[in-house]
Amino acid sequence: MRKVNKYYGTFHALRDVDLDIPPGKVTCLIGPSGSGKSTLLRCLNFLEDYDSGEVRIDDQLIGYETPGGRRMSARRLREMRRDIGMVFQQFNLWPHMTALQNVAEGLERVRGFSRPEAEVRAREALAKVGLADKEANHPSRLSGGQQQRVAIARAIAMQPRIMLFDEPTSALDPELVGEVLGVMKQLASEGMTMVVVTHEMGFAAHVADRVVFMERGEIVAVGSPREVFHDA
Ligand code: ADP
Ligand code: ADP
């Protein structure tokens, strides 16, 4: 991100944000509520349109045809977002589908796999998050932690180049947080590029390669966990 600014009406939510996200690493965004973490994350896949500056993944500009120019077509935006997995605080699973169907659906519809091929890949993704034995369960028959792991499986099954997590454990009962962080930690150890908005300081301190501390729409500290937490 280069000099990114975002306004909600007159409220200045992101102020000249410059940020590099290292590939193959975990970047954690931390800071007080309302400091702009989620806004920053959502600018990365243009769920939020920024007002000025540039967001690029590799060399590809996100959201606009040219810096400050016209918005991308919805079609180009969809193509671009195929490479970006996103996991939200709310799990957003389809309640009428099983865990397997939830994961297979996008593989079939977006990636164009045949149903059998989509299911093979969906099973692999579910196994990866430790839910091989729950594929036939509907979300109502899964714990919150299991539902969030299905949501992660759904995102990683698409083989994204980068994964964005927006407070993925905030809606969970405390005893279920660890299983979701554990899956994220495993993904990190496999070299997935991850950007994580979180209040889990243990995760930021122990799993992040880089910690970004935000306040009032600005990045006020960035560095290794040691650097950022030592200065804080
Ligand atoms: P954080 O993720 O750090 O809690 P957010 O990025 O969600 O912060 O929000 C940053 C600021 O922008 C907050 O003050 C919030 O109230 C405001 N904000 C977020 N979304 C909107 C919106 N859609 N309309 C108006 N203000 C918003
Ligand atoms: P602290 O209480 O010291 O802040 P945490 O309880 O958050 O530490 O956890 C310490 C580290 O272990 C963090 O990196 C966290 O992500 C990781 N962790 C916590 N629970 C699990 C789990 N069940 N499986 C794998 N890693 C976990």
Image (cartoon, helix red, strand yellow):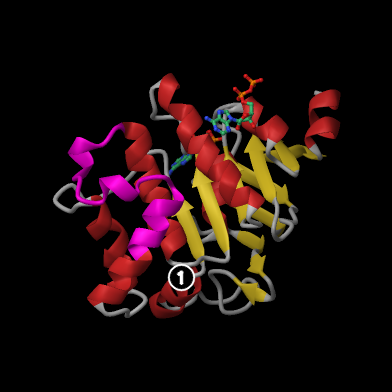
Q: Identify which amino acid the numbered label 1 is placed on.
A: Arg
Q: In the image shown, does 160 or 36 lie closer to the viewer?
A: 160
Left or right, 180 with respect to 117, comes to: right
Which region shows up in magenta?
A: 122-143
Please count the marks in the image: 1
Where residue 227 appears, as percent x and y from the top left, is 85, 33
Q: Which is more toward the observer, 139 or 42?
A: 139
Assign the C terminus to one quadrant of the image: top right
Figure check: 6 above or below 46: above
Residue 112: image location, x then y, percent: 32, 80
Residue in the picture at 29% in, 32% down: 143
Quadrant of the image occupied by residue 228? top right
Instruction: Report crowding for label 1: few under 14, some 14 to 19, many 20 or more residues within 10 A (C-alpha).
Output: some
Q: Is residue 117 magenta?
A: no
Residue 11 in view of the camera: no
Is residue 168 in view from this perspective? yes
The x, y position of residue 218, in whole percent, is 71, 40
Residue at mark 1: 82
Residue occupying the far left of the picture: 96
Which element type, helix, strand or loop, lies under badge 1? loop
- Residue 137 shown left or right of residue 165 in the figure: left
Residue in view at x 58 percent, y 28 percent: 200
Q: Quadrant of the N terminus?
A: bottom right
Where residue 189 sits in the image (x, y, percent)?
65, 49
**Which image quadrant is residue 158 in?**
bottom left
Looking at the image, residue 100 lies above or below residue 26: below
In this view, 68 is above or below 196: below
Q: Which residue shows up at 50% across the image and 73% down it?
A: 80
